[in-house]
Image (tube, rainbow, N blue to C red):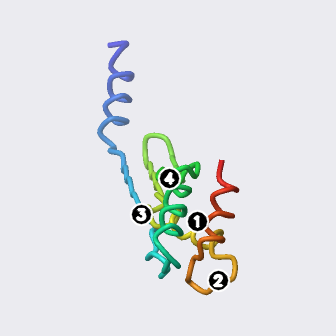
């Protein structure tokens, strides 16, 4: 008899139900249009891009809201692959004419560790 209130309380908590939501949002953008002066400019650019820290990683922001035993909401925002490419193009194409010259590519490559 002493355990009946505890059992009823536990049953009420477990039977009340919880709401859990999990969202994953991929934020990507279309690739910037870019052309290369020659094959050497493209090769130097892509080699430097492959060395860039985080160029191929998908970064993730996570937001979580909880009201214990009642409500739980989790949202993840994932950065798309084209974002790193576009950042590299913006850094490399110093005059922003959407044409990467060999000298721009070499300067960009020298700044990438």
Label 1 CA crowd tier, 10 Å (few <14, some 14–19, many 20+): some
Q: Nearer the viewer, residue 14 or 101?
A: 101
**Residue to which mark 1 is pinned:** 88
Q: Which residue is mark 2?
A: 96
Dot 1 or dot 3: first in sequence order is 3
- Is the C-beta separation of discs 4 and 2 under 8 Å? no
Question: In percent of the image, x 49 and y 41: which residue is there?
Answer: 68
Query: Does dot 3 land on a helix, a strand or a loop?
Result: strand
In this rendering, which labeled residue sits more in front, label 4 or label 3? 4
Marks 4 & 3, CB-CB < 8 Å contact: no
Q: Position of residue 48 (x, y in %)?
A: 56, 56
Residue 5 vs 20, above or below: the answer is above
For residue 50, which numbered disc appears in the image?
4
Disc 4/disc 1 C-alpha distance (Å): 10 Å
Q: Nearer the viewer, residue 113 or 32?
A: 113
**Viewer-side label of 1, 3:** 1
Mark number, residue 20: none
Residue at image x 58%, y 48%?
A: 53
What residue is pinned by disc 3? 26
């Amino acid at each position: 008899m002493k355990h009946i209130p505890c059992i009823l309380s536990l049953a009420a908590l477990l039977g009340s139900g919880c709401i859990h939501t999990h969202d994953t949002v991929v934020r990507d953008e279309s690739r910037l249009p870019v052309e290369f002066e020659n094959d050497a400019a493209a090769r130097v650019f892509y080699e430097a891009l492959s060395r860039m820290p985080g160029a191929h990683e998908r970064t993730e922001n996570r937001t979580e809201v909880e009201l214990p035993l009642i409500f739980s909401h989790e949202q993840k925002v994932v950065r798309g692959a084209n974002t790193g490419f576009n950042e590299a193009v913006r850094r490399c194409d110093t005059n922003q004419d959407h044409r990467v010259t060999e000298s721009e590519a070499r300067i960009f490559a020298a700044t990438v560790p």
